[in-house]
Image (tube, helix red, strand yellow):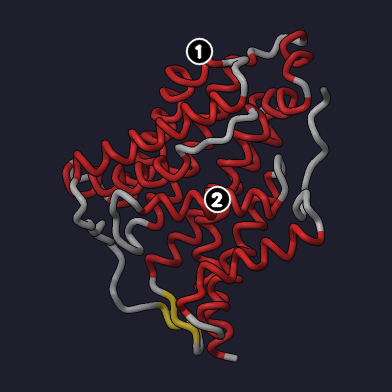
Amino acid sequence: MDQLLQHLVNALVLGGAYALLGIGLTLIFGIMNVVNFTHGALYTFGAYAMWIASTSLGLNFFVALPFSIVAGLALGALIEIVLLRPMRGADIDTTMLVMIGAGIILQSGTLWLFGGVAKAIPSPFPDAPLQLGSVSISWLRLFVLAAALALIGGAYALINGTRLGRAMRATFQDADTAALMGVNVRLIYTATFALGSSLAAAAGALLGPVYVVFPQMGDLAAVKAFAIVILGGLGSISGAAIGGFILAIAEEFGAGYVSSGYRDAMGFLIIIAVLLAKPTGLFARAERIG
């Protein structure tokens, strides 16, 4: 029982970051119909932004985190304005090729700038873990979980309780009708890509101090983000959040009770089973009008 609770706590910490990745990706695809192949690179960018802010700029750890999120927001807006906006109306194959190229450029640029040696982000938390009965959790991981839940709640509140969120949901339903009703669709696309990018950067900034930072860290994260979106259902924010926790639980319990070598495989086996039973995902929303 003690081991079960420990695995569950570990899964919740990882699931929070996975949920951020999934929400960011499903936002971009659901509203813009763009398969964002730079998502993994943005995750890596967030981790490196956290490292630069903490070491080179000397910022406090708790200031470096919002700095990394804002940096991801700015990079996402830049990618949308420079690459995606001129291609609005192009076929999806062309857009995918451009985004794949952008992802390769971002990863290669990271490798060129920082080298291939892994870097550690200093943590302000004590090394001694918090002991809750028979379950122990490091203070850093507890902070990661709390910050991830706060960001998930903030994203959900923004989408469902603000004017910007209403405009984003209207664009998801029908961009042409939203434009006729006065919505600046071009601005909504930029805001959507920037927000999705900032969530990916936030996930990297949160998990960077837990593990290490290296240029290829976003490769597997991108694959898992796509898996989470497929699992939860395209266009579903709640589905992406729940899907992130489901994937993390599957990985943690698979590593704990089967084999650590099958950690990543266990999550994808769950996804295959779900897709065989419900191809649209667990929480798929209705398709766009038109």
Q: CA distance from mark 1 to mark 2?
A: 26 Å
Indicate the position of residue 279 as horizontal and vertical percent values.
Answer: 78, 52
Q: Is residue 204 above or below residue 71?
A: below
Indicate the position of residue 113 as horizontal and vertical percent values.
Answer: 19, 39
Q: Amino acid at mark 1?
A: Pro
Q: Amino acid at mark 2?
A: Ala
Element at badge 2? helix
Q: Is residue 238 above or below residue 272?
A: above
Q: Earlier in the sequence, mark 1 or mark 2?
A: 1
User: From the viewer's perspective, is 73 left or right of 253?
Assistant: left
Judging by the rendered image, the residue that carries numbered circle 2 is: 225
Q: Is residue 205 above or below residue 145?
A: above
Element at badge 1? helix
**Other-residue count near label 2 (Cα within 10 Å), few / some / many at <14 / 14–19 / ≥20:** many
Q: 13 and 101: which one is in front?
A: 101
Judging by the rendered image, the residue that carries numbered circle 1 is: 86
Task: Give the residue displayed 47% in from the left and 41% down from the top.
Answer: 39
Task: Give the residue displayed 50% in from the left and 61% down from the top.
Answer: 145
Residue 74 disc label: none
On-image quarter of the C terminus: top right
User: From the viewer's perspective, is 31 left or right of 73?
Assistant: right
